[in-house]
Structures are given as C-alpha cells and as structure tokens.
Image (cartoon, helix red, strand yellow):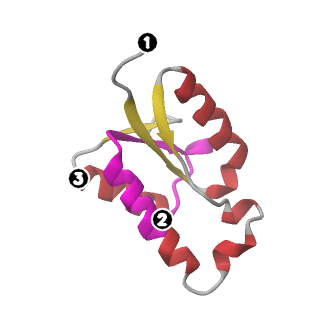
C-alpha cells in the first residue's frame, strides 16, 4: 500500500473525542494521511475558550481542509453543529469530497 496517500481532514463536534481517535486510527490503517483537530474544547481542553483562540482554531481548520483531498465528518448520532456545518459548506465550495460517519439523507 506504499505510494500515493489520500489526505483526509476530520470534522465534527469535539465532544466526540473518542470517536475522532477511533476514526483517525481506522483511516490511517486504510492508508490515508489524516489531519485532525489540535484541541478538544468540548472534551476538556479549556484553552479553546480563551479570547481569540476559538476563532483562530476555526480558521486553522479551514486551512486543514485546504490541504485535504476530502473531509470525513464525525457526526455521531447524526449530530452536525454550526461549526461543522460551516466546514462542510466550505469543503463543498472548495470542491472537496465529503464523507460521513453516519449516512446523511
């Protein structure tokens, strides 16, 4: 499986930290380069909520989407919050493929 690797950026609510880690491992073992979040604000990383940090991280995540071939949405139970919805819209506008953990109708 050595060769050209697809780059996938994970998107979704940071309250799903365990699912992020599981999907990251799974996609990596399938031969993909996986880009994830740096902090899990909804799972205990309080630094996210300091002044200006959330805005910086949101912008940084768009740059991670720019580097990817596609995004993979961690939508446990079908949940997609406003930040994730914004990332999906951005990825779609940029011509990136969008895949979901839970199929979307």
Secondary structure beneath disc 3? loop
Q: Earlier in the sequence, mark 2 or mark 1?
A: 1
Residues at discs 3 and 2 in contact (Cβ within 8 Å): no
Q: Is residue 73 above or below residue 101?
A: below
Q: Quadrant of residue 48?
A: bottom right
Q: Is residue 46 above or below residue 94?
A: below
Residue holding disc 2:
83
Q: Nearer the viewer, residue 101 or 17?
A: 17
Residue holding disc 1:
1
Residue at the extreme top: 1
Q: Residue at x 51, y 54 (%)?
A: 80
Residue 25, position as x, y percentages in the image? 62, 30
Q: Within 10 Å of the Cα at label 3, are there few (<14), some (14-19), or many (20+) other Cα atoms? A: few
Residue 37, position as x, y percentages in the image? 56, 54
Q: Is residue 71 magenta?
A: yes
What distance separates the C-alpha of mark 2 from that of mark 1? 34 Å
Residue at the extreme bottom: 51
What distance separates the C-alpha of mark 1 from that of mark 3? 28 Å
Residue holding disc 3:
94
Question: For the magenta stretch, what is the residue range?
Answer: 58-81
How many labels sit on residues? Answer: 3
Q: Nearer the viewer, mark 2 or mark 1?
A: 1
């Amino acid at each position: 499986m050595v060769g050209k690797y697809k780059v996938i950026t994970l998107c979704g609510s940071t309250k799903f930290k365990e699912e992020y880690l599981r999907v990251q491992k799974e996609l990596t073992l399938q031969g993909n380069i996986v880009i994830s979040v740096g902090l899990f604000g909804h799972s205990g990383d309080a630094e996210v909520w300091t002044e200006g940090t959330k805005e910086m991280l949101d912008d940084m995540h768009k740059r991670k989407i720019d580097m990817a071939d596609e995004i993979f949405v961690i939508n446990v139970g079908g949940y997609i919050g406003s930040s994730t919805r914004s990332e999906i819209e951005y990825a779609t506008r940029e011509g990136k493929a969008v895949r979901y953990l839970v199929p979307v109708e």
